[in-house]
Amino acid sequence: MEGYYSRQIMLWGEETQEALASKRVLIVGSGGLGCSVALALSGSGIGVLDIVDFDKVEIHNIHRQVLFNGDDVGKFKAEVAVGRVNKRASGVKATAFCVGFEDFIKENREYDLVIDATDNLFVREQINDFAKEHNIAWIYGSVEEFNGQACLFKESSFNMFATKEVEPKGITAPMVMQIASFEANLALRYLANLKVASDIFYYLYYNDGGEFEIKKFKLPSQ
């Protein structure tokens, strides 16, 4: 589509835009984070987006999972998501894999970056192990209530965090989209070979006075 990426080309030039078209990104999860990340990266011209999710759309998902509507209830999230992405984005190939992550990685596909869009701590551990084994970076994202977290992992490891099952709490759609946008921006800067700090854990939240804050923690290498 002529002119589709013209405003981005103004930002970083045709060579970088062409380089983005050669990138392969894996998105694990197509819920709130996954939908918004997929929209942002496909709209930015990432060439290949593979989306892994075995879950199906439920009515309570729709308020924050922006690729779905009421007609999608009962359908596989990943299939609906890639259908919408492929219609919207120029030159992007999105593919759905309606399986668990543990089964998906048996296919031995290669990626430039993996993005966590799950709500499962144990799957994040599997993503971390996969990324370490294949020497690729991955981006973590998490949202709860009005709080969110994100990190671009390269040298550090998610395994330093204790993981345990927790009861889900309430969640706001704008916070989901904010963290997804943060993940997508980290991804774009990394894939476009722009300066981007890695292994910094970002915690975004509203303090007791209602002021929005971002705290940063440098993680050790492992």
Image (cartoon, grey):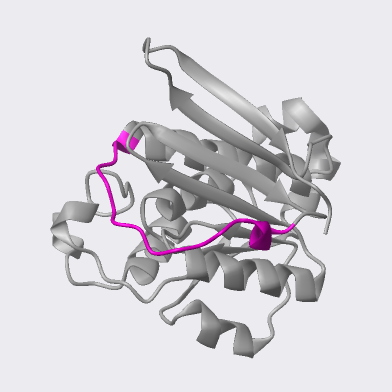
State the image quarter where residue 143 is shown: top left
* Residue 146 in view in this figure: yes
Q: Is residue 160 magenta?
A: yes
Image position of 125 with respect to 9: above or below: below
Query: 77 and 2: which one is in front?
Result: 77
Main SS, magenta region, reads loop
Magenta-tinted stretch: 157-173
Q: Is residue 9 magenta?
A: no
Image position of 204 with respect to 22: above or below: above
Image position of 184 with respect to 90: above or below: above
Image position of 167 with respect to 77: above or below: above
Query: 162 and 120: which one is in front?
Result: 162
The number of numbered badges drawn on the structure is 0
Residue name at image x 59 percent, y 52 percent: 140
Residue 145 picture location, percent across and down:
32, 37
Residue 128 picture location, percent across and down:
66, 66
Residue name at image x 59 percent, y 68 percent: 125
State the image quarter where residue 104 is shown: bottom right
Residue name at image x 43 percent, y 82 percent: 99
Query: 93 and 61: which one is in front?
Result: 61
Residue name at image x 47 percent, y 37 percent: 148
- Quarter of the figure that contains the C terminus: bottom right
Residue 134 picture location, percent across and down:
79, 74
* Residue 94 in view in this figure: no
